[in-house]
Image (cartoon, rainbow, N blue to C red):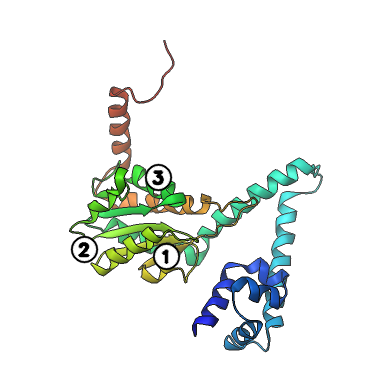
């Protein structure tokens, strides 16, 4: 696609509710393109006009809302206002996590786990708000194998772990819009040196998806002012669960060994006896 059509297509992929609810001109403004570009996009994918695309999205949105409403308020439920607000937040998170089980995402998760499990060395990268996801992936997986490295350290020296990285190594990189510049540049550097990239990202056309051998696409939207990392965290946990049986390690034994060592070090609080 020409660059303007790419921008319009990305908006349509990433903002389905806006496609259904906003006018074509409003969508064009949000996407940073002209309204004629939106019309060309519709014709590019075989529709007669942009209203046909809006109609498809609107129907899907109505169907989804009806299903969710029936699930949230079964017959005889009180429908309390406070419950409704909390339920909406939880429904949004649950739906985002559940999408990871869709066929397309499940295939990507399975393939990504195969690649990660077979790595000579495994690197975990996530900066700024994505750092907790990369840290959690590393923390859990490091109990099973010493091949995993977290690319984060005081003074910005975590990147030093990439020295000598190349073919046979794999990097899990977590990055969502707005993308941290350092995340993109480190992933690009790794890919240039033959490191396979597995991405947890927010779009099939994100900068990381273009680099990645496998991409797990998650949604960011929440019911509040911030973007949620819950779906990305769920994706990372799913990968660990799929990787563990493929490693030359016994997960249960490793867990018990770790608990015994941490108990000896008196790491965790215990009630006095």
Q: Quadrant of residue 142?
A: top left
Which is more toward the observer, 156 or 240? Answer: 156
- Label of residue 136 in the image: 3
Q: CA distance from mark 3 to mark 2?
A: 24 Å
Q: CA distance from mark 2 to mark 1?
A: 20 Å
The local secondary structure at tag 3 comes to helix
| Residue 233 visible in the snapshot | yes
Q: Residue at x 20, y 56 (%)?
A: 163
Q: Position of residue 241 (x, y in %)?
A: 39, 49
Disc 2 vs disc 1: Cβ atoms closer than 8 Å?
no
Q: Answer few, some or many: residues within 10 Å of disc 3's Cα (few below 14, many 20 plus, some between 14 and 19).
A: some
- Label of residue 215 in the image: 1
| Residue 237 visible in the snapshot | no
Q: Position of residue 183 (x, y in %)?
A: 37, 59
Sequence-first tag of 3 and 1? 3
Residue matched to label 2:
166
Sequence-first tag of 3 and 2? 3
Q: Answer few, some or many: residues within 10 Å of disc 1's Cα (few below 14, many 20 plus, some between 14 and 19).
A: many
Q: Quadrant of residue 269?
A: top left
């Amino acid at each position: 696609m020409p660059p303007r059509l790419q921008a319009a297509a990305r908006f349509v992929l990433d903002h389905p509710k806006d496609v259904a609810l906003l006018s074509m001109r409003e969508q064009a403004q949000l996407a940073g393109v002209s309204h004629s570009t939106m019309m060309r996009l519709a014709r590019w994918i075989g529709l007669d006009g942009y209203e046909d695309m809006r109609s498809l999205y609107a129907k899907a949105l109505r169907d989804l809302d009806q299903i969710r409403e029936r699930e949230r308020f079964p017959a005889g439920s009180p429908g309390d206002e406070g419950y409704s607000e909390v339920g909406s937040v939880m429904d949004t998170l649950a739906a985002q996590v559940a999408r990871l089980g869709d066929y397309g995402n499940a295939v990507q998760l399975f393939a990504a786990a195969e690649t990660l499990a077979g790595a000579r060395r495994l690197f975990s990268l996530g900066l700024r708000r994505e750092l907790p996801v990369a840290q959690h992936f590393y923390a859990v997986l490091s109990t099973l194998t010493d091949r995993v490295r977290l690319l984060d350290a005081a003074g910005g020296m975590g990147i030093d772990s990439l020295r000598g990285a190349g073919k046979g190594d794999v990097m899990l990189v977590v990055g969502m819009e707005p993308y941290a510049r350092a995340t993109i540049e480190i992933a690009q550097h790794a890919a240039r040196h033959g490191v396979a990239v597995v991405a947890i990202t927010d779009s099939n056309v994100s900068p990381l998806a273009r680099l990645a051998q496998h991409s797990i696409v998650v949604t960011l939207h929440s019911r509040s002012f911030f973007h949620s990392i819950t779906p990305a965290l769920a994706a990372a946990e799913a990968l660990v669960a799929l990787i563990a049986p493929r490693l030359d390690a016994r997960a249960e034994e490793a867990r018990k060994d770790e608990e015994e060592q941490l108990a000896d070090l008196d790491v965790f609080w215990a009630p006095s006896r």
